[in-house]
Image: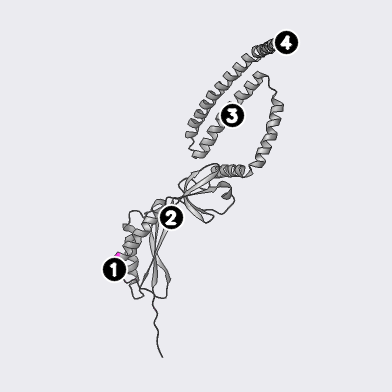
Amino acid sequence: MGDQLKVLDRVADKGLDIAMHFGPKLLVAILILAAGFFVGAWAGRATARLLARVHLEPPVSRLIERAARVFVFLLFVIVALQNLGVELLPLIAGLSVAGAGIALATQGVLGNVVAGLTIIFTRPFRIGDYISIFKEEGEVLAIELFSTTLGHADLSRVVIPNRRIVGEVLHNYGRIRLLSVEVGIAYDTEIGAALKLVGEILAANPRVLKDPAPGCKIAHLADSSIVVVALGWVRIPDYGAVAGELNRAIVESFRARGIAIPFPQREIRML
């Protein structure tokens, strides 16, 4: 029993010595980390205010803000470790080896990050543009480090990994699109009157942009009709709705003016 008490006394004395030696250093290290957290948050907010004057893309601003916050906090972590007497060189070497292993295991993720940074800084498209890639098309809703989100007219969304975008052929329509509406008229129709009527329909639609100017022309000569095409620039959200409005207006106006829209027909002669 006496030997056990002596062992406990020695353990207690050793623990007390460790606490007296490392306790103040540990307390100071905790205070340094707490200060680093608040200073890092302040640095992030200050960086965000500065970037707001430059008018960068939102993903770029968020990335730089987070990088500034993490960088400042890491400086305080280094100071805290030095205060505890930790050797930084072996720690850095160990982190390097671990980082290499993590990089090999997450090649796809890192590829998306690098591709995301490429998209953010080279700006092949911006939020609000209408793009087409990989048989997918839609309005760009978000550009993140890992993926880009496209929105469709049916309110669905398509999320494309960034590494599938960089290096591929991309069609960027911008924020407006050219709408083409075709209609066939009979061969005995007065061409000038039909083209004038289609032009008036385009001009009367408030969602068809005046600049670039709309227009109409003869697209081609079909077997049973002369195909007239109405061309008008519209904003991306109005594309589907304007197509329906123009089709309806053309049909109603042609009926009111007696302009026939012929159906396919063939003349057969028996000899």
Q: Nearer the viewer, residue 204 or 101?
A: 101
Residue 106 locus on image (x, y percent): 63, 42
The residue carrying mark 1 is 255
Report whether 257 appears left or right of 158: left
Q: Is residue 127 left or right of residue 122?
A: left
Residue labelled with disc 4: 3
Q: Position of residue 249 (x, y in %)?
A: 31, 62
The residue that mark 2 highlights is 177
Q: Is residue 41 above or below residue 25?
A: below
Residue located beneath label 3 in the image: 71
Residue 75, image quadrant: top right
Amino acid carrying label 1: it is: Arg
Q: Secondary structure at mark 2?
A: strand
Left or right: residue 36 versus residue 94 is left
Q: Is residue 100 above or below residue 72?
A: below
Q: Quadrant of the C terminus?
A: bottom left
- 219 on left or right of 161: left
Nearer-N-terminus badge (1/2): 2
| Residue 203 lies within the magenta run | no
Residue extending furthest toward the front: 1
* Mark 2 crowd level (few <14, some 14–19, many ≥20, 10 Å Cα): some
Q: Earlier in the sequence, mark 3 or mark 4?
A: 4
Q: Earlier in the sequence, mark 3 or mark 1?
A: 3
